[in-house]
């Protein structure tokens, strides 16, 4: 941690030492799923997974809810010939990359994405990326990262992807200051934040990932780093190594989170809190009105989070503090203690917090608890519904604009909808 | 390495899952990393199953590699057996586990479990989903029945005089295309012939049911892609003949009835189509005249593709302009059919190749999988889904079989619906100057989103990078010829333009006049 100004949070809050660690069967996507939103965000990038038919099938199934004319992702499926050494994997990769780049001359960055099989056979994608980068110099930048399920859980795939961008970022001149917002945000939300930072008087705001891979944000000693997503610890550390200062803040979900998040920036820029309140007042009022309607539905309702997107803690904090929901259990695949400290401080004491997963035992607890709402992955939703439990798909939290003031009510509504629906249905 | 944008089949362990999910009392333990658990959603979301698949995943991680993955495998198996109390446990591995060679099957065999343990070989780098399902079903049937195979030469216990013949229906699975309804339809069809159904498997069967398979007089191989190995083995070991005709379409349903009659030794001559079999009359009714010669492109699994080709050609009077399958294991059947309809067979699982071929063939209707639906949408051509892999909307709430007489009715409706209806097409031609019947008008029964027939093919093609453009830079149309072209009904105009340009190109004509237009029309003729 650095010597950054820190917003003060209540000293009480959730006790990290009481976290239950679980190991066992998981029910969660691997890091490949991140490609589904990353490729929508970085519009001139192509993601080539080097993996198996399983990887291709996962990507297709995770993206299955959407229809693309032609996706900017594909899988180079390893075949028996590649494994038996009958084909030179590097030559094969060059051939496949050439095929893609010929089809898509608009592509400026090609990501070679490692998978479990490519890791196990120790295919050196870093070397391949270097070689291809040299071959396509001036036209396409070729990078590599691993999204393998052996290491990356679901949203962590964004972390490993963005980490691969860090060495590519141009240096920020020593006498300059800039705010770098880290984590994929829908364009509409990004624009809202940009306007708000401008009004607050915070100049030179950049976002990572950028919309175009030709517009990489600079990083250096003058960079203040603000995380928009909680699952980007590795990238944050790498940016800190390049001189960036990490601002400690809750994540920008709900009024409280967004305000705390913005305040971390205004404090760093030494902008008075009064000015922050002045600028944000209309948006805060709007958000509070919107949330109030959803709160009527959510207040007093009991909710459990199964470990999935790593958004569990901040969203649980929002639902409990601003919507009056009761947290039965909050489970998260991985607890990044340092980044989560501000969130933990805001969560109620005595919270049942679980890190990791042992699926069957977790479902036993769920059936005993019978909460009003369970946040889970797509595979579990219908089976739980058929047991009479109401569910919310966690994947919507990464596809839907939910950050910031103007999306706070939408975020609450995502959780209210299944409850409203179940009260409507008479079938 | 094979470049893949969209794939028609998952890896072979998904096939094994389809068998486990289909059955009751069978549990599959998969040695696989966490991400492979995505497969559950295929069943719970696409098929809307209300139960979790009976599958436990070891969910191994990097830190476990090289340490004790064997213990992880054994613990997972033990926990699954304790918790779910299956009567048979299947052991399989996904692509990654295959590489680390933990031999989970051997580990399981050594555990001394009180139930049958079947370890599956699912080569992930050479085989695919349907192969995995076929193999798993075969191994299951064989594994459970091999100790009961009668010694060669033993007389079969013939059914008692007067008792009705019994059949097994083999091959329907979870995630299969309309299996749920086909089973009902074929059961009723057999009932109407005086044949009872002994066991349906794997869909809805238990391990105990599989032990009773030999009690049937014969097997119906309803989905050869899944059940041909099992049927073949039962035929060899238990002397059960196999009914091989798949009753999709009116003609095939008649053939099926005849084959059942022959094998079961019952007289089916007097069997008449039920009054609910409306498809033949609908197809003969005058409105359907407009279906004549509609160009149709067919792609799917081999069984459904071949059946669709026969219906398209013999029962709807379409012209087949493409026929193919992604199922290499059944390429021969599709090649033979393609020969009958005089088209080049397309055997590939490369989505891009299928897309190019569809665009080339300029069909007016595409019959395919959900992947061809993407293609057709992009080209602005109507499409009906006839085969797995399918989308959630291809698992309708209503009864919608593909097989038997009701299946033929369903097929008539689903294939003809996306097309402009005959009378309506006629009226649009007559009133084409009327503002309400402008070229862009869609069929009245379709929403605004669906573009009508051939006319929309061209703009859609022009905007797509797959467009197969005639050499438009060299060729020009005289203003008179353009005028004349506009007088041709819009839904055939695109075709007329293409035919004329192709005609001109072949003859080296650079300027297309009214003469060229009519020369081409006479040349192409219908
Ligand atoms: S868990 Fe591994 S093998 Fe499975 S889809 Fe993800 S990267 Fe591919």
Image (cartoon, coloured by chain):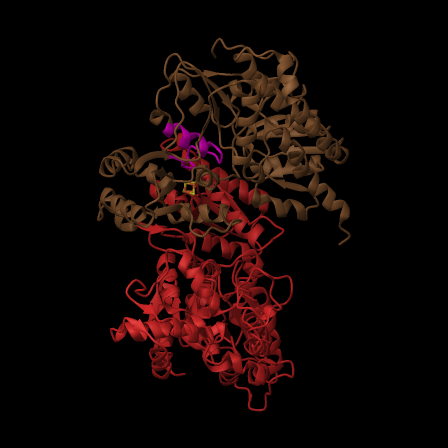
Chain colours: A brown, B red
**Between A306 and B145, which is closer to the camera in this rendering?**
A306
* Quadrant of the rendered image containing residue B126: bottom left
As for residue A158 lying within the magenta part, the answer is: yes
Observer-nearest residue: B468 or A162? B468
Work out whether residue A167 can be spotted: yes
Ligand 1 shows up in which quadrant of the image? top left
For the point 65% across and 29% down, the residue is A329
Left or right of residue B384: residue A147: left
Please indicate, yes or no, whether residue A21 appears anywhere in the rendered image: no
Q: Position of residue B278 (x, y in %)?
A: 61, 81
Residue B51, position as x, y percentages in the image: 61, 50
Residue nearest the viewer, comparing A372 with A99: A99
In reply to whether residue B281 is colored magenta, the answer given is no
Residue at screen point 78% across, 52% down: A426
Taking B136 as reference, is B295 above or below it?
below
In the rendered image, the residue lying farthest to the bottom is B270
Relative to residue B361, is residue A73 depicted above or below? above
| Placement of the C terminus of chain A among the 4 image quadrants | bottom right
x, y (%) of residue A110? 34, 39
Q: Is residue A402 left or right of residue B120?
A: right
Q: Is residue A163 left or right of residue A326?
A: left
Magenta region? A146-165
């Amino acid at each position: 941690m650095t010597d950054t100004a820190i917003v003060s949070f209540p000293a009480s809050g959730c006790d990290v030492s009481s976290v239950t660690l679980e190991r066992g069967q998981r029910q969660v996507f691997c890091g490949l799923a991140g490609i589904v939103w990353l490729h929508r965000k970085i519009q001139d990038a192509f993601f080539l997974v080097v993996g198996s038919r399983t990887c291709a099938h996962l990507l297709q199934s995770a993206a299955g809810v959407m229809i693309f004319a032609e996706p900017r992702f594909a899988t180079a499926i390893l075949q028996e010939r590649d494994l038996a050494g009958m084909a030179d994997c590097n030559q094969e990769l060059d051939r496949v990359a050439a095929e893609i780049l010929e089809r898509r001359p608009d592509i400026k960055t090609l990501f070679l994405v490692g998978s479990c099989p490519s890791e196990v056979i120790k295919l050196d994608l870093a070397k391949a990326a270097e070689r291809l980068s040299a071959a396509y110099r001036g036209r396409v930048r070729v990078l590599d990262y691993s999204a393998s399920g052996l290491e990356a859980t679901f949203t962590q795939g964004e972390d490993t992807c963005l980490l691969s961008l860090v060495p590519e970022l141009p240096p920020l001149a020593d006498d300059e200051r800039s705010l770098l917002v880290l984590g994929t945000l829908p364009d509409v939300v990004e624009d809202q934040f940009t306007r708000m930072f401008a009004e607050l008087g915070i100049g030179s705001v950049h976002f990572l990932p950028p919309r175009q891979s030709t517009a990489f944000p600079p990083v250096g000693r003058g960079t203040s780093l603000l995380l928009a997503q909680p699952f980007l610890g590795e990238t944050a550390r790498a940016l800190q190594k390049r001189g960036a200062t990490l601002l400690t803040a809750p994540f920008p979900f709900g009024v409280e989170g967004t305000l705390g998040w913005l305040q971390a920036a205004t404090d760093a820029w030494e902008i008075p809190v009064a000015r922050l309140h002045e600028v944000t007042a209309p948006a805060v009022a709007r958000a509070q009105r919107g949330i109030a309607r959803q709160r009527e539905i959510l207040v007093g309702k009991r909710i459990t989070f199964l470990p999935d997107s790593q958004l569990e803690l901040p969203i649980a904090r929002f639902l409990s503090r601003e919507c009056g929901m009761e947290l039965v259990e909050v489970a998260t695949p991985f607890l990044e203690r340092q980044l989560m400290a501000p969130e933990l401080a805001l969560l109620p004491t005595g919270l049942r917090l679980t890190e990791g997963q042992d699926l069957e035992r977790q479902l036993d607890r769920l059936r005993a608890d019978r909460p009003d709402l369970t946040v889970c992955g797509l595979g579990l939703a219908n089976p739980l519904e058929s047991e009479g439990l109401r569910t919310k798909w966690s994947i919507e939290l990464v596809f839907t604009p939910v950050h910031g003031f103007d999306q706070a009510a939408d975020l609450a509504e995502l959780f209210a909808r299944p409850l409203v629906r179940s009260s409507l249905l008479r079938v | 390495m094979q470049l893949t944008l969209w794939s028609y089949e998952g890896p072979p362990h998904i096939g094994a899952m389809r068998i486990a999910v289909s059955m009751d009392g069978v549990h599959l333990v998969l040695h696989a990393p966490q991400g492979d658990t995505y497969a559950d959603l295929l069943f719970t979301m696409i098929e809307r199953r209300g139960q979790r698949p009976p599958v436990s995943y070891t969910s191994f991680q990097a830190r476990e590699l090289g340490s004790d993955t064997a213990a992880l495998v054994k613990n997972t198996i033990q926990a699954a057996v304790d918790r779910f109390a299956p009567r048979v446990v299947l052991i399989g591995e996904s692509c990654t586990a295959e590489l680390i060679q933990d031999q989970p099957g051997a580990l399981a065999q050594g555990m001394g479990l009180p139930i049958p343990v079947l370890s599956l070989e699912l080569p992930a780098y050479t085989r695919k989903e349907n192969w995995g399902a076929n193999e798993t079903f075969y191994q299951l049937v064989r594994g459970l029945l091999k100790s009961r195979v009668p010694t060669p030469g033993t007389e079969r216990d013939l059914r008692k005089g007067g008792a009705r013949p019994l059949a097994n229906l083999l091959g329907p699975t979870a995630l299969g295309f309309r299996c749920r309804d086909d089973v009902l339809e074929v059961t009723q069809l057999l009932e109407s012939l005086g044949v009872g159904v002994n066991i349906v498997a794997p869909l809805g069967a238990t391990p105990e049911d599989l032990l009773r398979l030999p009690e049937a007089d014969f097997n119906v191989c309803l989905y050869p892609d899944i059940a041909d190995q099992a049927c073949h083995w039962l035929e060899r070991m238990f002397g059960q003949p196999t009914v091989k005709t798949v009753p999709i379409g009116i003609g095939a349903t008649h053939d099926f009835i005849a084959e059942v009659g022959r094998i079961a030794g019952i007289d089916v001559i007097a069997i008449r189509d039920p009054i609910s079999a409306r498809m033949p009359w609908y197809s003969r009714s005058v409105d359907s005249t407009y279906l004549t010669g509609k160009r149709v492109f067919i792609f799917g699994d081999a069984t459904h593709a071949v059946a669709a080709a026969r219906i398209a050609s013999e029962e709807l009077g379409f012209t087949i302009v493409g026929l193919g399958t992604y199922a290499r294991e059944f390429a021969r059947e599709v090649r033979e059919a393609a020969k009958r309809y005089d088209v080049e067979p397309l055997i590939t699982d490369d989505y891009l190749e299928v897309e190019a071929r569809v665009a080339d063939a300029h069909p007016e209707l595409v019959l395919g999988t959900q992947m061809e639906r993407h293609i057709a949408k992009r080209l602005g051509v109507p499409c009906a889904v006839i085969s797995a892999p399918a989308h959630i909307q291809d698992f309708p709430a209503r009864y919608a079989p593909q097989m038997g007489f009701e299946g033929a009715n369903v097929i008539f409706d689903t294939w003809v619906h996306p097309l402009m209806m005959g009378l309506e097409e006629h009226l649009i031609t007559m009133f084409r100057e009327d503002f309400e019947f402008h070229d862009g008008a869609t069929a009245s029964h379709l929403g605004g989103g669906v573009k009508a027939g051939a006319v929309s093919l061209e703009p859609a093609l022009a905007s797509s990078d797959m467009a197969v453009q005639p050499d438009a830079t060299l060729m020009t149309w005289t203003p008179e010829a353009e005028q004349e072209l506009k007088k041709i009904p819009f839904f055939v105009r695109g075709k007329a333009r293409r035919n004329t340009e192709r005609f001109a190109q072949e003859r080296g004509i650079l300027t297309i006049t009214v003469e060229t237009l009519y020369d081409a029309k006479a040349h192409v003729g219908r």
